[in-house]
Image (spheres, rainbow, N blue to C red):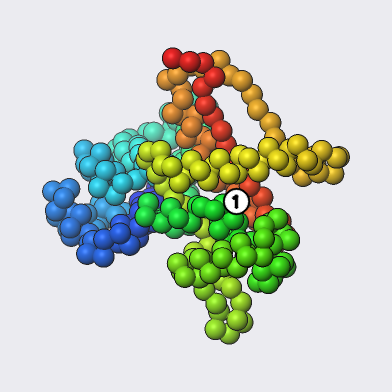
Amino acid sequence: MKSLNIQNTIEKIIEPALLRKKKTNPNFSLRQMALHLKLSPSFLTNVIKGKKKFPAEHLDSFIQFLDLDEIVASNLCEFIQKQELKSLLDQSKNFNKYFKKSNSKKITNKDHFEFQNQETIINPETKPYSELPITQMTLLNPWYNIAVLDLISLEHFSSEPKWISDKLGISIIESENALKFLLNNDYLSIDKNTKKFVKTDKKLRLPTKESHFSVRNYHTQMIKKGIEFMNTNSNKDEFKNRLITSVVIGTHSPNFESAKSFLHESLYTTADILSDGSADELYQLSVILFPLTKK
């Protein structure tokens, strides 16, 4: 039986969180983390490198110490489940014989496994997001800070404030202020050779574990822009270039967290699909899931 490839997977899952921890606390080290978790530094290093089995009994304290949001925590839990499953399968010499009879798929030597025809993927290489600490929420407001930052990725991007202004429907002063903010806070830099703007991090995340005014305000601004776009762009061509849809669902509450995790993953998968190739437009993708009934 081919072995499940889990080398370095956990390191890739938590690498953004480790970098974020270092940004907020320059004195942070794996030794400090090991002491907190009551593990030896060498053992913790080997766990993160994929050389030792993750101690499942330390999962909660591990998540809390790194302040992992539900997306990363979910990926970590899936990794541990795979690791546990691999350990069990390695103990059974006849596993593939019985597994084949059950019409399920065999485990293969990939960064994912298939079980009872349900595929679960952990491939952090496709999601190299850098995590921002909560202290950097100022990036969210006004909304066009992020828009200008991602506008850089367009193939025909121009750093002229007038061009940015025309593209985003903001004033020239707002364009200039956004560029200054992004440069002063190291979200952008200027390439010494080409003299062009470059993003310091290609992909950013701002993970949160509770509601924050800055985040709510950003979403409010983008929802308003979505309403404005829907009400002012209604011809056939514009209709083809947007997707505004919804569904009302009689919900079984215990399934909510699973559905939320699925939507999170779908968001990033959609972003990967849309960004595959030379970028020529900038889109906003928002997901809203909330109860209509009152408690």
- Work out whether 131 lies above or below 239: below
**Image quadrant in which the N terminus is located:** top left
Quarter of the image for residue 82 reads top left
Give the x, y percent position of residue 16. Answer: 39, 56
Give the x, y percent position of residue 92. Answer: 33, 35
Give the x, y percent position of residue 189. Answer: 52, 73
Q: Which amino acid, mark 1?
A: Asp
Q: Pick the residue in front: 73 or 138.
A: 138
Residue at the location (58% across, 85% down)?
193
- Work out whether 116 lies above or below 229: above
Residue at the location (37% across, 55% down)?
135
Q: Pick the residue in front: 50 or 281.
A: 281
Q: Is residue 89 left or right of residue 244?
A: left
Which residue bears the numbered disc 1?
272
Q: Pick the residue in front: 55 or 216.
A: 216
Quarter of the image for residue 225 reads top right
- Work out whether 13 lies above or below 246: below
